[in-house]
Image (spheres, rainbow, N blue to C red):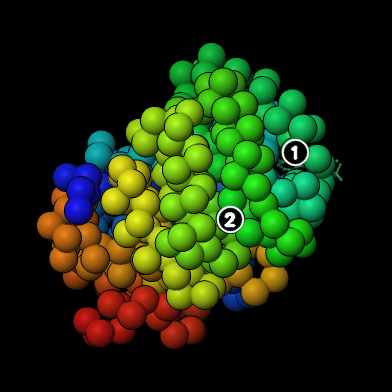
């Protein structure tokens, strides 16, 4: 079986994880979590989200978080920006990489960002253009790539259409979000076979939520098909506020343990990562969502 020799891990816990936590997390705790993740060797950390605080109150302090982040020459801190207002906040905070986020399902697009898929893509065009002009890089997310909480089926063609438009507007990579974690290795294989006919594997990443316990299996299948960028969340934090029942992303600790077993380079120190997962789980007063995190305690 072929595997990539190295995998880039995008740590999304401080954003995708904390955006869905009931317990409010203060700015100092977020900054300390991100510091520990950076110290563990994670080179890209999604540190916050410049969305409407009315929609996602947990991300309201993102401006302060970015102002307090330690500068670390090996770590890039990224953020979500749904519109120009979000981009302006990101640029004011010195963010170097932003992400726009679309969906492959109309109902999820409406619930998440209050507009249709087509409207969202029109809205993202000037955001991406302005970001690129200001020297930032832009990533694109697509939610509900293999299933939606509000619609029965999501077609691979719908994912492809959105992905191609995001790439055309300047996104360097598309993160394929299984927002509610319903995918299986077979549904990801079908999707990837379709996308890889038009898009190179270097422009795709997998973003697997673990609601049905399939995330690691789905990631393994994606690696076998040539994908080498994987999103994950320390301690398996999170979910999505607009997808009931969505649990966290695959736990970063579990991903790193699997990559170690496969002999794939990733650059992360597992004991330090486990310590960061324990830190945030204690702060949230909840069980650690990583099996590896629990086993290594
Ligand atoms: P809207 O209500 O249609 O927008 O929301 P609006 O332009 O009419 O603005 C309404 C109010 O929000 C106004 O304030 C704006 O100023 C303010 P008011 O005049 O009422 O006082 N506002 C903002 N404030 C700060 N920063 C901004 C901003 N924009 C507007 N950037 C909007 C549209 C897109 C803003 C809203 O729907 C929103 O913020 N949605 C974000 C939802 C979200 O963050 N979801 C979770 C992230 S996506 C995800 O988790 C999936 C992913 O992980 C992949 C996967 O798993 O699938 C990425
Ligand atoms: Mg997500």
Q: Is mark 2 within 8 Å of ligand 1?
A: no
Q: Residue at x 12, y 57 (%)?
A: 263
Q: Is residue 149 left or right of residue 116?
A: left
Q: Position of residue 240 (x, y in %)?
A: 63, 62
Tell me the element at label 1.
helix
Q: Which residue is mark 1?
A: 117
Q: Is mark 1 within 8 Å of ligand 1?
A: no
Q: Which residue is mark 2?
A: 146
Residue 141, above or below 149: above
Q: Residues within 10 Å of mark 2 (few under 14, many from 20)?
A: many
Residue 74, above or below 148: above
Q: Earlier in the sequence, mark 1 or mark 2?
A: 1
Q: Residue at x 48, y 28 (%)?
A: 198
Q: Residues within 10 Å of mark 1 (few under 14, many from 20)?
A: many
Q: Is residue 94 left or right of residue 11?
A: right
Q: Position of residue 116 (x, y in %)?
A: 80, 40
Is residue 263 among the parts visible in the rendering?
yes
Foreground mark, 1 or 2, reads 2
Q: CA distance from mark 1 to mark 2?
A: 16 Å
Is residue 70 among the parts visible in the rendering?
no
Q: Position of residue 224 (x, y in %)?
A: 29, 51
Q: Position of residue 105 (x, y in %)?
A: 72, 49
Q: Is residue 105 left or right of residue 59?
A: right
Residue toward you, 31 or 249 = 249
Tell me the element at label 2.
loop
Residue toward you, 189 or 218 = 189
């Amino acid at each position: 079986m072929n595997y990539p020799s190295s995998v880039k891990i995008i740590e999304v816990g401080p954003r995708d994880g904390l955006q869905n936590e009931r317990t409010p997390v203060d700015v100092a705790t977020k900054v300390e979590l991100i510091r520990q993740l950076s110290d563990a060797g994670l080179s890209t950390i999604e540190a916050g989200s410049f969305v409407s605080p009315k929609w996602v109150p947990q991300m309201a302090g993102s401006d302060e978080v970015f102002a307090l982040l330690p500068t670390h020459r090996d770590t890039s801190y990224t953020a979500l920006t749904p519109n120009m207002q979000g981009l302006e906040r990101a640029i004011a905070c010195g963010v170097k990489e932003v992400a726009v986020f679309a969906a492959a399902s109309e109902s999820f697009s409406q619930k998440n960002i209050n507009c249709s898929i087509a409207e969202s893509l029109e809205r993202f065009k000037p955001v991406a253009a302005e970001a690129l002009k200001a020297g930032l890089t832009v990533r694109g997310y697509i939610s509900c790539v293999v299933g939606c909480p509000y619609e029965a089926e999501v077609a691979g063609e719908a994912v492809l259409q959105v992905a191609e438009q995001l790439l055309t507007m300047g996104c360097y990579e598309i993160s394929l979000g299984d927002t509610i974690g319903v995918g299986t290795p077979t549904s990801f294989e079908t999707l990837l076979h379709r996308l890889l006919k038009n898009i190179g594997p270097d422009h795709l990443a997998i973003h697997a939520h673990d609601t049905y316990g399939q995330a690691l299996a789905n990631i393994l299948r994606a690696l076998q098909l040539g994908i080498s960028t994987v999103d994950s969340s320390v301690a398996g934090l999170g979910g999505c506020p607009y997808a009931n029942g969505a649990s966290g992303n695959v736990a970063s600790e579990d991903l790193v343990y699997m990559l170690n077993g496969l002999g794939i380079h990733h650059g992360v120190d597992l004991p330090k990562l486990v310590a960061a997962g324990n830190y945030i789980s204690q702060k949230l007063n909840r069980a650690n969502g990583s099996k590896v995190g629990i086993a290594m305690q």
